[in-house]
């Protein structure tokens, strides 16, 4: 599930075509889920214009790929009120999750949860990626305010994920270890998913790692097949 390329700057134009071209390449590569980076009004564009552009991107991708699983990453660029506006505006787009809408906040997340419940929405709320207080993130999940936990597969670590996964399952939420930045992170996250379960989506970083042979991993129709060799099936010198 590759992340969307860097958001367009004001005035670049050809937005929908650029995004659909990127998604087409990913679909041909075997991906069946797209994560779209939004929050343009927080950094790259005036607030209202950026919000409208975010909606345009989501709709363009949904229209072009009605069968894809669609996720959005807000990178803490929305307020709770903007998040509710966004959810109302794309309620017919069948989003799988919203990620990091704003910095973890009980009051704001409560507003989002109440809105999702009131509207009967199935959208999941994912958080915990960016330098999290892990106990706080777990407490928010236990309070019913988060659905998916995102601690990074490297900075948080494989051992730490193994340690907390029983509690994640006990709470009844999901996990998807953050894996952006290095191609090997995707493979580690996939191994966690296979070994621990409770991980429905693996974030993908397309690319190769010099000196590492990872050809034992294959992606087809949205499913990644893992090698059975020791050492995560990774061979040095590839």
Image (cartoon, grey):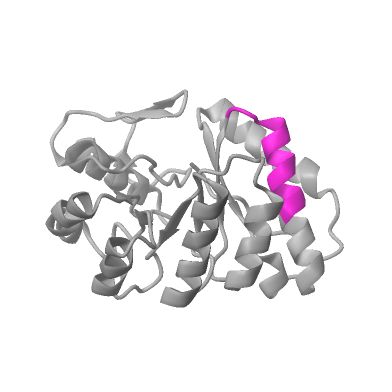
Residue 194: x %, y % from top left:
23, 36
Of residue 111 and residue 157, the one placed in the foreground of this image is: 111
Q: Which quadrant of the view contains residue 101?
A: bottom right
Residue that extends furthest to the front in the rendered view of this protein: 118
Residue at image point 49% right, 44% down:
122
Q: Which quadrant of the view contains residue 149?
A: bottom left
In the picture provided, is 206 more to the left or to the right than 23? left
Which quadrant is home to the C terminus? Answer: top left
Residue at image point 27% right, 30% down:
226
Is residue 12 visible from the viewing direction of this image?
A: yes
Residue that extends furthest to the top in the rendered view of this protein: 221
| Main SS class of the magenta portion in the image | helix
Q: Which residues are magenta?
A: 55-67
Q: Which quadrant of the view contains residue 41?
A: bottom right
Residue at image point 30% right, 43% down:
199
In the picture provided, is 134 more to the left or to the right than 17? left
Residue 82: x %, y % from top left:
65, 68
In the picture provided, is 100 more to the left or to the right than 40? left
* 58 in the magenta segment: yes
In the displayed structure, 219 sits above or below 185; it is above
In the displayed structure, 99 sits above or below 231; it is below
Is residue 235 visible from the viewing direction of this image?
A: no
Residue 6: x %, y % from top left:
64, 58
Residue at image point 30% right, 47% down:
189
Residue 57: x %, y % from top left:
72, 49
- Counting the numbered discs, the total is 0
Of residue 104 and residue 206, the one placed in the foreground of this image is: 104
* 162 in the magenta segment: no
């Amino acid at each position: 599930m590759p992340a969307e390329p860097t958001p367009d700057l004001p005035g670049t134009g050809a937005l929908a075509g650029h995004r659909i071209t990127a998604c087409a390449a990913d679909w041909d590569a075997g991906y069946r889920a797209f994560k779209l980076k939004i929050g343009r009004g927080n950094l790259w564009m005036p607030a209202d214009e950026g919000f409208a552009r975010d909606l345009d991107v989501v709709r363009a991708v949904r229209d072009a790929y009605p069968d894809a699983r669609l996720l959005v990453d807000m990178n803490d660029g929305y307020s709770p009120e903007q998040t509710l506006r966004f959810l109302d505006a794309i309620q017919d787009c069948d989003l799988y999750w919203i990620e990091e809408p704003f910095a973890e906040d009980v009051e704001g997340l409560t507003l989002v949860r109440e809105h999702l419940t009131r509207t009967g929405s199935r959208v999941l709320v994912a958080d915990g990626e960016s330098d999290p207080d892990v106990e706080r993130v777990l407490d928010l999940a236990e309070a019913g305010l988060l659905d998916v936990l995102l601690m990074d597969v490297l900075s948080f670590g494989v051992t730490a994920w193994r340690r907390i996964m029983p509690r994640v399952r006990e709470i009844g939420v999901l996990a998807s270890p953050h894996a952006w930045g290095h191609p090997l992170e995707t493979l580690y996250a996939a191994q966690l998913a296979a070994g621990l379960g409770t991980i429905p989506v693996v974030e993908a970083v397309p690319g190769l790692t010099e000196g590492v042979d990872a050809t034992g991993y294959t992606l087809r129709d949205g499913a990644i097949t893992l090698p059975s060799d020791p050492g995560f099936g990774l061979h040095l010198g590839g």
